[in-house]
Amino acid sequence: MTWRDAPQVDFDSITNIAKDYGDVHLIISGVNYTESPWLVKDMGEVTNVLVEISLYQPLNGVKFLVDVLGEDRVLFGTGYPARYPHCAIFKVLYSDINDEAKEAILYRNGLRMLKHYCRRAV
């Protein structure tokens, strides 16, 4: 494998892990075009998988993720310092989703995860 080769991801394994550990949230990052069919196929079966948006590039991709996963399972991320933060912000702000979904993605979902897991760690 060279630096140009994408690692092969076994999506069925991720789905099975999510099913086996339903009380743990799995946050998937680096999702892009290739993973979209998996999201549509398997993410209806599991509700503990969330997707972070920094690398998701499809036109109106945030709307697609909200339509497939629901607004509570889409997490804001910038990819900083490799990417400019404003790109991810605009990706959400200019999505064809309602303001409540935008607020959920931009901060409420991340805050919910932090509260849940920080409380458990203390």
Image (tube, helix red, strand yellow):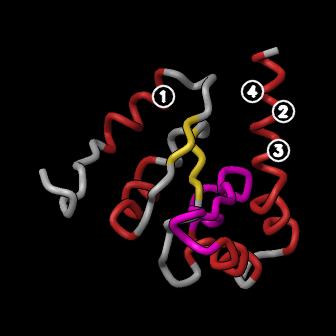
Neighbor class of circle 1 (other Cα within 10 Å; few <14, some 14-19, many 20+) is some
Residue contact at pointers 3 and 1, CB within 8 angstroms: no
Farthest top residue in view: 122
Residue that mark 3 sits on: 111
Q: CA distance from mark 4 to mark 1?
A: 19 Å
Query: What is the number of the mark on residue 19?
Result: 1
Residue that mark 2 sits on: 115
Relative to 59, is 96 on the left or the right? right
* Residue type for callout 3: Leu
Question: At x 85% / y 64%, what residue is drawn?
Answer: 103
Q: Nearer the viewer, mark 3 or mark 1?
A: 3
Residue 52 location, x and y as percent? 59, 55
**Which of the two discs, 4 and 3, labels the residue nearer the N terminus?**
3
Q: Which residues are magenta?
A: 65-84
Neighbor class of circle 2 (other Cα within 10 Å; few <14, some 14-19, many 20+) is few
Q: Is residue 94 magenta?
A: no
Query: What is the number of the mark on residue 61?
Result: none
Residue that mark 4 sits on: 117
Residue 66 location, x and y as percent? 65, 64
Q: CA distance from mark 4 to mark 3?
A: 10 Å
Q: CA distance from mark 2 to mark 1?
A: 23 Å
Residue 65 location, x and y as percent? 58, 64
* Residue type for callout 4: Tyr
**Depth check: 61 or 85 in front?**
85
Residue contact at pointers 2 and 3, CB within 8 angstroms: yes
Establish if 7 lies above or below 86: above
Residue contact at pointers 2 and 4, CB within 8 angstroms: yes
